[in-house]
């Protein structure tokens, strides 16, 4: 954990993330725990007591809900490298969903919080669709597993059935309901526990419980098979039965997560704050900053279509593409400049300058 406020950061070490969820899933509490564990605050703020850092408006503290998106910056160290994490805590109430949408336009990734008792809720589906629209990569966190009736497995099932079948656990919570006391890192094959009666206690590494070892190995194989599609070298090594290092798994998982079609899932109780460091590790490992993106991806669909079709085309090929919306659909699936160059190579009659200067406006964030 490190503050590092006076350090100049390489953009590769910056993470711009948002916390999105249905109301009362624990977004602000999770953000408060992040601020505590990164050294920004000396205690985890409580919504019930009205002393949170993120809900600063009087109306928010009186009602115990987030009304306006709030931004903050924290610093986190992983493997002796310090990262800058810019966080936007968004509202969960349906009346303020516009706040979520305007935040998603500037985010490089998001942590979607789910209530362990309720699973996927109506606003969970809304913010998920909004993130799909702006192609924001996501990590899922099943919160409040310490409450009676909470179940990580049932919440995971609801995510797969209602949001995406490509959600796979990277952490398996230990314990049940009030006995929740840690998690197992499926990639690293390590277990971490804490005393559930002590708030903010540091995680302690322990042996994986004997009755969970087979389940962990099964989940690890499923995880590897799910991400293998995103790296040919990784898939070849796996199919040949070669050993895969943890670093190779994390790197391939990063590619899968940043594609926006694979969603790592973790779980725990963010109110106590014990497992929040593991969420931060996932953020810096998997939600990398997209240094260059097409500006058209940040527009609303209506504006994007109007802008692209109104641009003068120098070649018949480009005009044909615009007229048939093929270019629009292509750009919506191209997140980086490199992908656009590859597309232009396949369509040589569209010069690089024509596509970028007249239609795409590639900018750095």
Image (cartoon, rainbow, N blue to C red):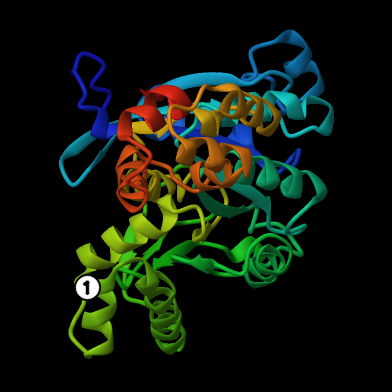
Q: In this rendered view, identify the residue nearer to me: 108 or 301.
A: 301
Rendered-image quadrant of the N terminus: top left
Residue 307 spot, x, y in % from top left: 60, 23
Residue beneath the point at 68% across and 58% down: 116
Nearer to us in this view, 18 or 205: 18
Q: Is residue 271 above or below residue 309?
A: below
Q: Is residue 278 left or right of residue 151?
A: left
Comparing 112 with 195, the one in front is 112
Indicate the quadrant where residue 180 lies. bottom right
Quarter holding the C terminus is top left
Q: Residue furthest top?
A: 58
Q: Residue 201 location, x and y as percent? A: 41, 46
Residue 338 x/y as whole percent: 29, 43
Residue located 55% across and 56% down the image: 268
**Residue drawn at x 21%, y 23% as measured from the top left:** 9
Give the quarter of the image for residue 306. top right
Q: Residue furthest left?
A: 80
Q: Residue at left 67%, top 29%?
A: 100
The local crowd at label 1, few if under 14, some if 14 to 19, many if 20 or more residues have their Cα within 10 Å, is: few
Residue 65 in view of the camera: no
Position of residue 296 in the picture relative to residue 365 (left or right): right
The residue wearing badge 1 is: 233
Q: Is 326 on the left or on the right of 129, as rendered?
A: left
């Amino acid at each position: 954990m490190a503050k590092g406020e006076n350090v100049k950061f390489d953009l590769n070490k910056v993470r711009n993330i948002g916390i999105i969820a249905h109301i009362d899933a624990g977004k602000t509490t999770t953000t408060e725990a992040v601020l505590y564990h990164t050294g920004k605050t000396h205690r985890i703020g409580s919504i019930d007591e009205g002393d949170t850092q993120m809900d600063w408006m009087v109306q928010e503290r009186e009602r115990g809900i987030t009304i306006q998106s709030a931004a903050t910056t924290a610093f986190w160290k992983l493997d002796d490298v310090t990262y800058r994490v810019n966080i936007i805590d968004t509202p969960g109430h349906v009346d303020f969903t516009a706040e979520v949408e305007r935040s998603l336009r500037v985010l490089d990734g998001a942590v979607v919080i789910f209530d362990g008792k309720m699973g996927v809720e109506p606003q969970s589906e809304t913010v998920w669709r909004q993130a799909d629209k702006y192609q924001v990569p996501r990590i899922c966190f099943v919160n409040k597993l310490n409450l009676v009736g909470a179940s990580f497995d049932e919440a995971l099932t609801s995510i797969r059935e209602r949001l995406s079948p490509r959600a796979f656990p990277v952490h398996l919570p230990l314990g049940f309901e009030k006995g929740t006391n840690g998690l197992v890192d499926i990639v690293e094959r390590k277990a971490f526990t804490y005393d559930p009666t002590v708030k903010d206690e540091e995680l302690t590494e322990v042996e994986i419980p004997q009755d969970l070892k087979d389940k962990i190995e099964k989940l690890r194989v499923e995880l590897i098979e799910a991400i293998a599609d995103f790296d040919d070298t990784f898939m070849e090594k796996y199919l040949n039965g070669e050993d895969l290092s943890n670093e190779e798994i994390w790197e391939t998982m990063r590619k899968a997560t940043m594609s926006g079609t694979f969603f790592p899932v973790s779980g725990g109780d963010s109110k106590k704050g014990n497992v929040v460091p593991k969420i931060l590790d996932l953020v810096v490992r998997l939600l990398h900053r997209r240094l260059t993106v097409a500006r058209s991806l940040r527009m609303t669909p209506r504006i994007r279509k109007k802008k692209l079709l109104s641009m003068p085309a120098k070649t018949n090929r480009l005009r044909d593409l615009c007229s048939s919306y093929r270019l629009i659909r292509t750009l919506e699936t191209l997140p980086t400049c490199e992908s656009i160059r590859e597309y232009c190579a396949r369509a040589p009659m569209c010069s690089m300058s024509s596509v970028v200067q007249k239609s795409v406006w590639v900018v750095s964030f």
